[in-house]
Amino acid sequence: MKEAKIVTRDLTLHYGLKMALNSINLHIPEKEVTAFIGPSGCGKSTFLRCLNRMNDLIPSVHIKGEILIDGLDIYQKKIDVVNLRKKIGMVFQKSNPFAKSIFENVAYGPKINGISDKKKLTEIVESSLKNAAIWDEVKDRMHDSALGLSGGQQQRLCIARTLAVEPEIILMDEPASALDPISTGKIEELIFELKKKYTIVIVTHNMQQAARVSDHTAFFYLGELIEFGKTRKIFTAPDIKQTEEYITGRFG
Amino acid sequence: MERHFELELQKLNRRVIKMGNLVAFQVHNAFDALLRGDVELAEQIIENDRKVDKLDTKIDKLCQRIFALTQPVATDLRLIMSSLKMNNDLERMGDHAVTIAQKSEGVSEYRDIIDELHIDELVKMTDMIVNDVITILNTRNTAFVKDIFDLAQAIEEKAQGISAKIIEEMMHKTEVIVVATNLIVIITAIERLAGYSTNIAESIVFIVDGRIMKHKKKNFESPAGTSASVTETPAEPAPDQTGDPTSEATPSEG
């Protein structure tokens, strides 16, 4: 296994009195794809949102334990959350482009980070769109509204928008669940390409997708991390019976 | 929760067991034909091979369908992969039974040579390994797999010893060349039956716990606390050699 980019130590999370994550210890390797799987309510999305401190926005959330990214605890008081989220991009289930042009959507992040040079911005937008495998489809209509793109294109535009601020980690919360098979295939191919440069963590309900795109798989159930291992092992001979029952559909 | 393709997996399992019983029956009869010089029985075995081939195709098609429609993983994946492989091994065993049956006609006049070479002992050991492996196929009890590997090794050594004696005999008596050649083909087929039996035992280990035993048989360790011979304590009755090998517990077949 490659060196860990993200390490969690005894990470426990409560929503008010309800425990949503129970003492999670996990090493997420650098520049690989790690998939989180598990039934609804198992804590996988909650755990994902801990990784860029998105749960800070929910008042009833209490977190114990540590999350280290490159060895640094991201829940330390001195951590600048805005900078943290620049380093850790996120792609959501439903694509959410701004009601702006395609160009402006991608240029938005670099602009608020202080880049104003038009030539530099154009370069960033082009390379981000190319890396998100959507450049050829939009290069002739950069100033059209992003809302006119198809669902699959909008999702890849959102990935381009994430890439534009040069993150190191990309979190994906069911990025293809609302897409048709062709668009899903494109997103999956894109994930495969992106892992050469980025550490990717993906939450998915689609077992075949987890099997296809990820190097490592973590199975969550009732707030516990049940099993973590190489995807090729988890999907051929998992060690834990609960994992086997879940991935083969015998669960419940 | 009942999964809709559970029935398909059960059907596959039944068909592979049916194939195992059918092939074990063919092998047993081929040995009878050889040792008793029963030409009529030999012809019946050759005729019955059609049933083996037909079932082989049915199992292949069923595996193909389950792969295409259900994207199996973990234990389901291992079962289907292994079923394909075991089906192939069993079909080849059926072919070897036919070879033995065909060649037994050519050696039926030479009882004295067969007795002198103690081929009956080799046949007994091989009949046992085939039955043992079919029992494991039924019970999935991998505690006895080590016994299968050991028995296969003993069969191989005995077969090589017999072959060496035949070759020596051929060198001194040119008049036995024809029968000796037939006997070598038979001995080779018997040796291969033991080889395919170990392949099937390996596949069963893979189904049960995901271990790949191919090329690693020497390191195989049975689950703790088990060393008895499979034939002594089968969890379910061994296939009935005298009954109809093609019968299934569940009659419905798609």
Image (tube, grey):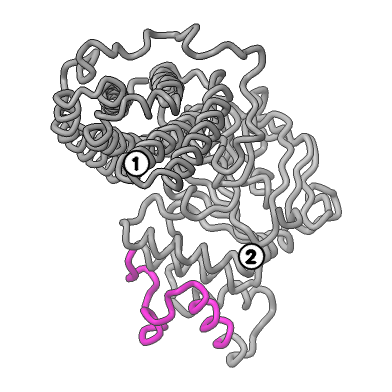
- Vertical relation: B188 (above or below) A169: above
Q: Is residue A75 left or right of residue A114?
A: right
Q: Which residues are magenta?
A: A122-150
Can see residue B4? no
For the image, the number of numbered tags is 2
Q: Secondary structure at mark 2?
A: loop
Q: Is residue B31 left or right of residue B42?
A: right
Chain of the residue displaying label 2? A
Measuring from the top left, give residue B214's x and y in whole percent: 54, 41
Tell me the residue that label 1 is attached to: B176
Q: Secondary structure at mark 1?
A: helix
Labels 2 and 1 within one chain: no
- Vertical relation: B155 (above or below) A167: above
Q: Nearer the viewer, residue B72 or A89?
A: B72
Can see residue A233? yes
Tell me the residue that label 2 is attached to: A198
Q: Nearer the viewer, mark 2 or mark 1?
A: 1
